[in-house]
Image (tube, rainbow, N blue to C red):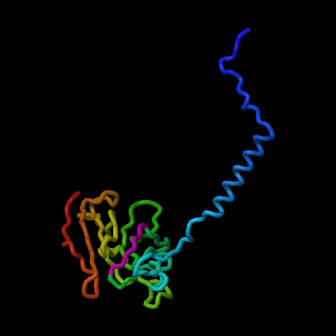
Amino acid sequence: MQHPAVPELAHTTARPIHWLATAAALAAVVAGSAVLQPDAATAAQTGTKTHTRAAAGAPAPAPDPAAVDFPIDCGPVPSEVKKRATGDLDGDGKPETVAVVHCKAGSGTPPDGVYVITGSGSGSGTPRVVATLVDPKDRQNVSDFAVRDGAITATLLGYSSPDVPRCCPDKQDKAKWRWKDGTFERDTPDRARSV
C-alpha cells in the first residue's frame, strides 16, 4: 500500500459549524464598517481662504466652427474644417477658436484659409469670423498649426511659381500671430525658404 504524499487533513471537510463561524465573522466586519465611517467629504478647502468656481461662473465654451459661414469660395463643393485650436487670444477671459479651412475637394491639395472665430459679446448667438490670417487666394497650405500662450503658430507651405506641381510645395514659412492694438499682427517676418 502506498501512502499519499500529503497527509489527510481533518479540517478540509466543511461542516455546518465552519459555515456558521464564517457567517458570524462576515457579519461582524460589515457591522464594524457601518459604525466606523470616515468623515463626510466636502468640496471646500480647509483654511482661511476658500474659493468656489460656481460663484465666478463656468467659463464660456469656445465657438464652434461648424456654426460659421467661412469667407471661402468653394463653388459647388462644401468647405471643411481641416484643423482647429482654441485659446484666449485677446486676454478677455473668453476663448476664441482658430480654424484651418479648405474646400472639400475629391482629390488634390486645395489651399487653406486660417480664420479666427469669436462668440457674440453676450455669449449667446452665432459665432462669427473676426479675422482672416491666411486667405485661400494666397494658395498656401497649413501644417504644424497650434494656439499656445495667446499666440497662433503655423507653418505655411507654398509654391515659388505656377510651374511647381500643386502636390509638392517648394516654399516653407514659419508664421506667428498675436493680438496687439486691436488686430492680429504677424510677429514673424514673411521669410520664405525652399524645402
Q: Quadrant of residue 34?
A: bottom right
- Magenta stretch contains residue 126: no
Q: Work out whether 23 lies above or below 186.
A: above
Magenta stretch, main secondary structure class: strand
Q: Work out whether 23 lies above or below 79.
A: above
- Please name the residue shown 28% across and 85% down the image: 183
Q: Quadrant of residue 112?
A: bottom left
- Please name the residue shown 34% across and 71% down the image: 147
Q: Which residues are magenta?
A: 82-89
Q: Position of residue 99 (x, y in %)?
A: 40, 73
Q: Position of residue 107 (x, y in %)?
A: 44, 60
Q: Position of residue 117 (x, y in %)?
A: 40, 80
Q: 35 or 44: which is nearer to us? A: 35
- Magenta stretch contains residue 86: yes
Q: 55 or 67: which is nearer to us? A: 55
Residue furthest to the top in view is 1
Give the quadrant of the C terminus.
bottom left
